[in-house]
Amino acid sequence: MQQPYAHPIESKDYLEALIERSMDAIISTDADGNVVTFNQGAEVLSGYRREEVIGQRVPVLYESEEVAREVMTRMREEGGILSSFETTFKAKDGRLIPVLISASMLYDEEGNEVGTVGFSKDIRERKLAEDELRKTSEELKHSYERLEQAQASAISAEKLAAIGRLTAGVSHEVLNPLAIITMSLQLMIKDQETPPEIADQLRVLEEQAYRIAKITQDLLYFARHRPPERRPLDFNETLQRVLGLLERDLQLHNISVELALSEGLPPVSADQGQLQQVVLNLLTNAKDAMPDGGRLVLSTKTVENNGKKFVELWVEDSGSGIAADHMDKIFDPFFTTKPEGEGTGLGLSICQGIVEAHGGSIRAENIPEGGAAFVIQMGSE
């Protein structure tokens, strides 16, 4: 018969050696939470010598009293056994150390709690690896998103280029016969022999012909992307000239205009015709946003950005504002919220193209009090 294995070291000495030589921190407490056992692994982990800790209450080793209570509460909730619970120790030098702790309650023969024993593993390297992996994952995610955006932009650019080529050709073909139709309508209206009721109908046709011409010219401009012919301009003067063109129309729509134009603005380097087109489009959009009347506020000022001066224009209306799901689309070509047949969706896209070609920027935002604002920044001379 095989004899039972007899270890040469006494059982108590052997267990004490195992505890002492363990790479993990092994810490036991009595019923009052005072540290009873504190092995070499615990010294290495915490920076404390055992004589500094033995007899001290165990919370001294944790990040805070609350963290120590959380460990005890969790252990009791799990029936006296805590398995692989992540928490934080506080080293002697104040460093916070993430640890993975497995612990259990100790009971006497009557089932009374007499203390705890816990095994804590330093997981700093694992946390660093997890953080590095998370960082790498985020970078890969952002790279993939940028790749998708680049692919979408390339496809969109190619589509817009094709639309531009088609638009340029179609616009010329439409404008030439449209000019003849418009001239013929004007001659018929002025003809003394044309009955008044017919002349009224012809004026409606003339108005619609002008509307077709305007849409076609917008399409043609969008297709051309003509570079700006710059010269020093007074932004306030340009704004007031365009406002003068729309003044009567704004009054008819019961829209009041408030001006807050800063004096002594530095001149902007811009193409006069293109700048006027931008302002006209923004004022027209503001008018359309207030079909029942409202308030239009126009303001200019000088701002500084990264050491460079800009002239800033705010066009604010008291309309219904811009829907959240439309905010990132309003400058897209052909996007419009107007009813079918009342807009091409090119106005804001053209504005953005002109402003950016001048080295400026344009943005839109909702006003807390209600309505929307379009903000343009153009570089000064």
Image (tube, grey):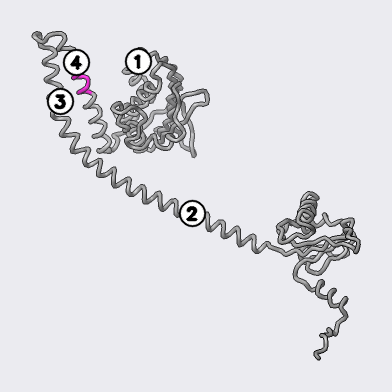
Question: Which dot, 4 or 1, sits closer to the camera?
Answer: 4
| Local secondary structure at mark 2 | helix
Nearer-the-camera pick, 111 or 83: 111
* N-terminal-most mark, 3 or 2: 2
Residue 218 against residue 32 in the figure, above or below: above
Residue tagged 1: 247
**Residue 155 rendering spot, x and y as whole percentages:** 32, 48
The three-letter amino acid code for the residue at tag 3 is Ala
Q: Residue furthest left?
A: 193
Quarter of the figure with residue 356: top left
- Residue 214 among those drawn in magenta: no
**Residue 259 rendering spot, x and y as whole percentages:** 44, 18
| Local secondary structure at mark 3 | helix
**Which of the image's four quarters has the C terminus?**
top left
Q: Is residue 294 left or right of residue 216?
A: right
| Local secondary structure at mark 4 | helix
Question: Which dot, 3 or 2, sits closer to the camera?
Answer: 2
The three-letter amino acid code for the residue at tag 1 is Glu
**Residue 141: which disc?**
2
Q: Marks 2/4: CA distance? A: 59 Å
Q: Marks 1/2: CA distance? A: 51 Å
Specify start and end residues of the magenta stretch as a single range. 203-210
The three-letter amino acid code for the residue at tag 4 is Arg
* N-terminal-most mark, 2 or 4: 2
Nearer-the-camera pick, 299 or 281: 281
| Local secondary structure at mark 1 | helix
**Residue 179: which disc?**
3
Residue tagged 4: 203
Which residue occupies 36% across, 48% down?
152
Residue 324 against residue 99 in the figure, above or below: above
